[in-house]
Amino acid sequence: MTTPAYAEIGITTNFSFLRGGSDPRAYVHQASILGIPVIGIADHNTLAGVVRAYKELDSDKVLHKPKLLIGARIVFIDGTPDILVYPRDRAAYGRLCQLLTRGKRGDDITRIEKGECRLTFGDLLEFAEGQLLTLTLPHRFEPAQALDVLAKLKDSRAEGVWLAASLVYRGDDRRRLARLDDLAAKANVPLLATNEVLYHDPGRRPLQDVLTCIREKTTIEAVGRKLEANAERFLKTPREMSRLFRDFPKAIAETMRFAGKIDFTLDQLKYQYPDEPVPRGKTAQGHLEDLTWAGVDKYFGGKIDDKLRATLKKELALIAELKYAHYFLTVHDIVHYARSQNILCQGRGSAANSAVCYVLGITSVDPTKVDLLFERFISKERLEPPDIDVDFEHSRREEVMQYVYRRYGRHRAAIIATIIHYRPRSAIRDVGKALGLTEDVTAALADTVWGSWGKGLNDMQVRQAGLDPSNPMINLAVELATELIEFPRHLSQHVGGYVLTQDRLDTYVPIGNAAMDDRTFIEWDKDDVDALNMMKVDVLALGMLTCIRKCFDLIDHHKGKRWVLASVPQDDPKVYDMLCAGESLGVFQVESRAQMNMLPRLKPRTFYDLVIEVAIVRPGPIQGDMVHPYLRRRNRLEKVSYPSPSPDHGDKDELYNVLHKTLGVPLFQEQAMRIAIEAARFTSEEANGLRRSMATFRNVGTIGQYEEKLIGNMVARGYDANFARSCFDQIKGFGSYGFPESHAASFAQLVYISSWLKYHHPDAFCCGLLNSQPMGFYAPAQIVGDARKNGVEVRDIDVSYSFAQNTLENTDGKYCAVRLGFRQIDGFHWLDPDEELLKEAQAKRQGKVYVTQKDWADLIIDARNSGPFTSLEDFARDTGLPKRALILLADADAFRSLGLDRREALWQVRRLPDDVPLPLFEAATAREQLDEHAKPLPEMPRAEQVVADYQTIRLSLKGHPMEFLREMFSRERVVACRDISHENERRRVRCAGVVLVRQRPGSASGVVFMTLEDETGIANVVVWPKVMEQYRKEVMGARLILVEGYIQSSPEKVTHLIAQRMVDRSHDLVGLANDALSRKHPVPAGADLIEPLNDDPRAHADMPAQKIRHPRNVRILPPSRDFH
């Protein structure tokens, strides 16, 4: 007997966050294996996962291609039972998107919070035209309500109405099916079979139970009937579904009739980029060409050689052929707006291959100086839209984003989504809670995880957490956490990628509100948008641009010279001398430990050397073992040669043009692609597939399918097998994270400019970096220390001189002094001036008057402008600051200009009434009382001052905590960090320091690099994987660490300490703090006048409560900056 065909339309994926137990792609594969002809994805109030399923149908591994129905399960807030909604055609699909957008965005009166979707039955009826609607009823239902809903659905403009029926072994299935059949007959609607699928395979039941517990914020023991009764809600075969519905065969047959009514597929989304306004009588292409030649006049004075002119004409012709002129005009307009507002910006990525982008002012890579490949940006063969990334100052990028919204409207512009996935640490925490493990156990397991990427926990990590991996509950937690890794947790907004459309964007994809006011984003991410050939514009943020702009402003204000990116003098040999010495702390892209070590070895002397420097310390060149050959050739220790095929397979110089700029060694993505085409004879289609697989680290695993062909073809053509293998290893590295040449060239511009600022204006550079935090590898303490080493005076925070921001003060010396600002004080209330400018501009556009808020720094400055402060009491009265602000200032030692050190200031602040303004005569009386009772307090010892500085402002100008531990460490024969570089090769030493940075690059095969600091300088430590596994807890958790190992030096005098044994000595830092805090001090007379410190947060709505200063709560140092 032939099994009837069956379509499963009730599938819930893991994009119904914390409900579905399987990925959309898993359903496609399972349907192919089971022979299911049609599947319908209907997630809860979302279309977030449908593109993944659609895209997976193109996979060669899906042998039988099921028909994919696109729909959504509408969950209502008014008590209406869930309804499966499937659009019949493109128009109905647009209405479904608009329905979901209403639920996610709200209206002018009600703003829906991010992640919510609030829909009523009436909303559905409004958008019902062309929809196939299937009512799903809960296990227990009221027939009268169901009949009423069905009747209203039938009266709507829907394409058809059905009643869903499922049989999932709950004990009363036959009776319930009979009731549903009777209900369908009364309502005169067909009965439709579905298994209400929650996972593709019954083995996912335990994970789905855990997801339920996470969603309900409970444990397996307490969740009760909220769990499914069994493991039956998986994707079943047509045969099994026919057996279950043997008494209702029409319900099975109806599924195929239902599917047959649907014509819509995602192929029908014909994307159209918005038309840009152009001058009267001009086409978009004509206007673009006018702007291009105007740019030639601007950048080259109209004088260009034949080669560049031919390049521009070629690019313009291809842009015209592919109809991309509007896109280029959009990006040009956004960049022009930013510059009109004095916002620094610069294009990067593959767009830097374009001469047109350069003369339009979008990118900064001069095509006359760097030979780039336009075909990597736009190609007829690829037929993919261009992708222009533009970086803006991170503190002012929001102004540009709001401009995009204003220009196109929120119905035509939105940010794309980013899928926030479970990573090992979050997975083990959530699974542990669901299984009822204690917080101590889950924290111990989570603390063994480095970074956010990985596949789970191994037995060694479990043992290092002090747990038994054979314990059944621990083992189950680890297994389920491993399954949960990479599950979507929720949607967030992309860092700045916009989709723009000619028509309404909300007819393509639902749009929701972001957590930030005035931002909206779609439900699809970058990969989804790419799969549907939708063009995006990337409005990205870059902290270094903010820093550079602030540096330019400071130089202009204090030194009378206005710089812009293009006016910075190029090829300054002194700047390159600095870089060759590895002096690059704070410099863009080359401040990491690996880059600092590479600089003296590569010895950059030209701009293109910086391009290579940016790209070489990346997984691609490292995994391909290309770094050392390049350095040997650069330093003339190895002859430059070019790989070649055998004479009967091609020209011996076929790779010369590909590799000559990098001395015969491939370092860039573009070179890897060209090698695949030239040496391995890949077709354009194969090369494009290879390029896609290299695109981002998320595609690791897809590159492997090209391995045999690339290596085999190269060897067959006579190339050395080791070279072929190295090329493929390099390509695999690019799949993790690699730079194309154009991207490296764009970043090299900022490397040079930030290096120029560091060398010529270290005062402004230090100040700009501090005012742009958080950014970069190093904390403020190291930035300040480096500036002082380079001759810049840095001055303490002081109420008589400081502002909210760090500032420059004129001196008689070569450089200005850096005055630390109030923003450095942890917890001090200050407002970002860039944010205030944005709020003011937004209010002005809305016809409102924005009153700039007064922060604590403003109150101090206003009072200071009326006259100098003479006492703390005058300061408190004149500024009107709350007592908490006064305590923070005193704790930060900011009253020195009033003759008060930290301890004396704290005593005086605590004597003041609690946030009560002092009238003139009462203030005088209080002052007399203080004068009568107070006696001078002894000066705090320097060790205590340093500890207190780090606790309050995260740095100290008075010393380093390690100074006060040096005597102890010297007795233990521990050398200072500075002395590491003077030790002999292979000598065994012991070194201790505060952990500044931890790095475990993906390219380093598990090697961890640590940077330690003491009062003398820094030391670089290498931790090999075996040592890392043995001392994982110390490596990951120590703030102060003692390392035993041996010295390893390079010919360029780059020295490392290779770790063999590690000891966590953080308790010595805590002991230093305890000693400072527990030291007995004389209590001055007048202590009875001291008001108790009110630490109730409700008494200070503008400030969180300060932690009680018990020694165990003291934070000596800010945490290290960890990178992976």
Image: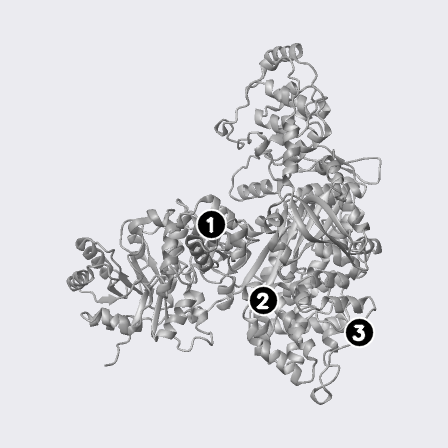
Amino acid tagged 1 = Arg
User: Mark 1: few, some, or many residues within 10 Å (few <14, many ≥20)?
Assistant: many
Q: Looking at the figure, which quarter contains the C terminus?
A: bottom right
Examine the rendered structure and indicate whether residue 1096 appears above or below residue 136: above
Judged from the image, the secondary structure of the residue bearing numbered disc 1 is helix
Q: Nearer the viewer, residue 641 or 394?
A: 641
Q: Position of residue 1046 (x, y in %)?
A: 74, 54
- Work out how far the residue at label 3 is from the one at label 2, CA to CA, in angstroms: 30 Å
Report the amino acid beneath label 3.
Val
* Residue positioned 77% across, 48% down in the render: 758
Q: Are marks 2 and 1 in contact (CB under 8 Å)?
A: no
Q: Secondary structure at mark 3?
A: loop
- Which quadrant, please, contains the N terminus? bottom left
Tell me the residue that label 1 is attached to.
Answer: 429
- Label 2 sits on residue: 695
Sequence-first tag of 1 and 3: 1
- Residue 439 relative to residue 851: left or right: left
